[in-house]
Image: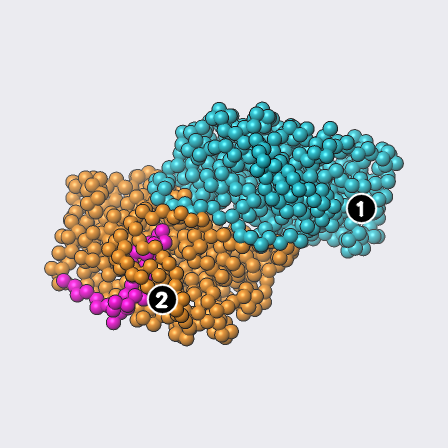
Chain colours: A cyan, B orange
Amino acid sequence: MIDDKMKKYDKIVKNAAGREVPTIINGEEHIPYQGVGKYKPTGKKYAPPIPTCADYPADGNKTVSNLKEVLIKAGLKDGMTISTHHHFRNGDLIANQIFDIAKELGVKDLRWYPSASFPCHEHLIPYLEDGTINRIEGSMNGPLGKFASEGKMKGLGVLRSHGGRYQAVQDGEVVIDIAVIAAPTADAFGNANGVDGPAACGLLGFALADSQYAHKVIVVTDNLVPFPAIPWQIHGNYVDYVVKVDKVGLPEKIISGTTKITKSPDRLLIAEMTAKFCDAAGLIYDGFSYQAGAGGTALSIGNYFGDILRERGWKARFIRAGSNKYPVQMLEEGLVDYILDGQTFDLEGVRSMRENPGHVNTSPFTSYNYHSKGNFASMIDIVVLGATEVDVNFNANVVTHSDGYLLHGIGGWQNCLFAKTVILPIPLFRDRMPVILDKVTTLCGPGELIDVIVTERGIAINPKRTDLLEKVKDSGLPIRTIEELKEEAERICGVPEKPVLSDEIIAVIKWVDGTVIDSVRRVI
Amino acid sequence: MIDDKMKKYDKIVKNAAGREVPTIINGEEHIPYQGVGKYKPTGKKYAPPIPTCADYPADGNKTVSNLKEVLIKAGLKDGMTISTHHHFRNGDLIANQIFDIAKELGVKDLRWYPSASFPCHEHLIPYLEDGTINRIEGSMNGPLGKFASEGKMKGLGVLRSHGGRYQAVQDGEVVIDIAVIAAPTADAFGNANGVDGPAACGLLGFALADSQYAHKVIVVTDNLVPFPAIPWQIHGNYVDYVVKVDKVGLPEKIISGTTKITKSPDRLLIAEMTAKFCDAAGLIYDGFSYQAGAGGTALSIGNYFGDILRERGWKARFIRAGSNKYPVQMLEEGLVDYILDGQTFDLEGVRSMRENPGHVNTSPFTSYNYHSKGNFASMIDIVVLGATEVDVNFNANVVTHSDGYLLHGIGGWQNCLFAKTVILPIPLFRDRMPVILDKVTTLCGPGELIDVIVTERGIAINPKRTDLLEKVKDSGLPIRTIEELKEEAERICGVPEKPVLSDEIIAVIKWVDGTVIDSVRRVI
């Protein structure tokens, strides 16, 4: 229900990136993007109410018999903000149940604040249609993104990076009424972790902000152990209730189809060129660090890095990962001191996290929150990221396809742009659509933070990075300007048509500091 | 300088325990004690200013060359609150240097907010005299307590338990301007731990609240390692500056003289009777938990518990510890699943913490903070504590001696009173002064939370604990009323004279919820 007080969006301005964005979003004021590092917050962190042990059971037993009862106890009512997390990725079983219960109870106008939504949440479309859920603020992968793109969501979607999600909660931009944390292992006090139990999925860092700041925090588990559940990645001291269910998630579904080394010759070439570029530019050294991500190309790049380390007797200081079997192999082989885990992409990663002290649990607070006294994203030597589109100013898009559909989340992508060298290894075209354009459909990452584009037909270096240009000038690598790469793609595929989009805004993209960097338009 | 606006204390009322306490303390309003679990906070947690990564170095290097420079950078000025922590116990080298610098800079009226002060801080007495330091809010062990007791401190002392210290910071009752965290290992970003490095002292949990809420956070270390310093018990994301010094602390001085098993026959008898009582009362079972503390008697009790477990093939679920060689032996022998460490009492404890994953870092947040959604202190089966005095209503004193001198800190003592069964094993008299009195000199712990007094001449059970009375009635143990024990002591030593104290208040004792439970008077 969007009443007069709560306009879906209003007061559109042109932000510092030249993008038109609303400054009233779902009835609340937001700040337009002002440039990288330009917006300085002046307020105070969100201050949740002070609880007292006098209101909690002395024996630490916070169990409640089922999800419905606990949502009633937590005071579920119209207009609340409910959060869930995507550590089970497409194997989440809890979010759908929460909104089934909300529907059953006749609760309306909820804001769903997931750390990400997946195709398994298509089940929620009827609730988005009937007003049980007003809107999703969070990444929308697949069907929910399509639903939003078609202008069907009642409220305006708000997409935030993982770090931006933490920032929004910390800063009080989003006040979570009820956080529901699905946990593979917990004790009755609410201490919880993701490494033990039948549904072990890795780690629970996405839920950290919620546990610290939400008014009511519910831990749901299928593996209730005697106090203390160790490691206690979520502290029971923040938790109100604990619910035991039969099955909390499907850990086998944390495996993404993209967590396999690519077999595509073009992509293998891109991976090899990326690794060679990093080496030629002197970015790989004894003690370096990198984040390669989970895509097939990225995994191959990690393997090339491993080969270089092995050959020279070097060691990486850390890999920033979603752990899967490839970085785990490197850890076990002694090619790296630490894996800093943000999420977990296969069950080998989960096993290793349980067994190997070289894994370090991270959270969007330690890794990505821009409103803190630094975070470690900016300390990583090399970050390899994907993109759906890049423009000639190195601006990049990661959420919409060339047809305008909002089909991907931001994840940690924006946060990672602060790394020392950011490389986008991308094909020059996909389905005969060039990837390098004059202007990206949706601006997610400002070009000034993107250093290198590696394609199967050449490497473009951001002119800002004169140091890199100098280093690789005699490397024999196919260094091109980004315009040259664009022209080459257009010679092959023709100049692409722009997607025809409505003026209507269906979602906004937040920058890491909470400002609005772009709007997403309805697909016609 | 106590000006008109900042009265040392004022507006004395009688609190719910019948004790006269000021409600204006150092110019600020405080709430008198209202009874256990009676005061319900209605406010919000303290909200520190929102920082931004834009103001911190992207490469994560926050090092500043020395302590003086960093204190100037942090904006040290008159009237500020400066915090330090006692994980080096009597081997702290940093606090004295901070105030040497403050003196050199001519800064006045500082509030020193240590988690505890030790005899090594006697060095600071001239600064308390000349007004560099206005007052100490924190435990005062030894010389500083004597100084305060003699009415020489300019401001009023405020003593808080470890949990109360966290609560005061979290609730905004104490706003820390500059926190200085001495760390045996840190990286340039400020991640820090206490288990590695030449000054390894165990853990840094006392500094957690300060890192989360202080306006400026300084990490001082003598062991700077490449990012990431793992474990990162203190998160660099909360840290402003890092300083490298030659020597950050004397880890050999974390060993207290009391961390040796007692050889006194009377104390051994008390220890044995305590263990027998726990067994007879059914408090020891497969999966039980206990906290025995570091005193000689307490350590012997732990050994008796170990014998019982070994004999019956049982295992404790956890020991709450300051780790030292005795609980470490039990962990290594497999007599306990986990040690939940709050501080560390010897270097065997430090070694084991580094090597054995059965150790769990805790902090006053997880263990003791009363203004949270529960804490684990109330979930411990048996807690064994000391006391300087107990009265016939089981009220106990842990800070002042029978001569009225304030010579001990509260530590976690008040917080531990919430355990399922609280036992005070104490001698019936010390230096011919009876320990059981009609009324304790200073009320630190309400009698309703204290269950059992074990002396060498008999055991008194709080009449509230009819369950315990019933369980041990046929045990053959010497169960007495507390009045009988008091009479016996008086038969031997005579009725003790009360200390002659001035009406002047020199310090107050906070209860775990931030209310004022008692006042400490000047010694004449």
> Which residue, as the protein is rendered here, is positioned at the far front?
A4
Task: Please rate how many residues cluster around mark 1, counting C-alpha atoms within 10 Å: few if below 14, some from 14 to 19, many from 20.
Answer: many
Say which quadrant the N terminus of chain B sits in: bottom left
> Which residue, as the protein is rendered here, is positioned at the far right?
A491
Q: Going by the image, does A469 lie left or right of A55?
A: right
Say which quadrant the C terminus of chain B sits in: bottom left
Residue occupying the point 22% across, 43% down: B465
Q: Nearer the viewer, residue B279 or B157?
A: B157
Instruction: Give the image location of residue A237, x and y in percent.
Output: 43, 44
- For disc 1, the marked residue is A460
Q: Nearer the viewer, residue A487 or A52?
A: A52
- Label 2 sits on what residue type? Lys
- Label 1 sits on what residue type? Ala
Task: Please rate how many residues cluster around mark 2, counting C-alpha atoms within 10 Å: few if below 14, some from 14 to 19, many from 20.
Answer: many
Q: Is residue A28 above or below residue A314?
A: above
Q: Nearer the viewer, residue B260 or A40?
A: A40
Q: Is residue B64 above or below residue A295?
A: below
Residue occupying the point 86% across, 33% down: A494
Residue occupying the point 77% across, 32% down: A499
Chain label for disc 1: A
Residue B509 lies in the magenta-colored region: yes
- For disc 2, the marked residue is B8
Report whether residue B266 is seen.
no
Residue occupying the point 34% across, 55% down: B31
Residue range highlighted in magenta: B495-524
Decide whether the magenta segment is chiefly helix, strand or loop.
strand
Q: Is residue A84 above or below residue B85?
A: above
Chain label for disc 2: B
Q: Are marks 2 and 1 in contact (CB under 8 Å)?
A: no
Report whether residue B487 is seen.
yes
Q: Are marks 2 and 1 on the same chain?
A: no
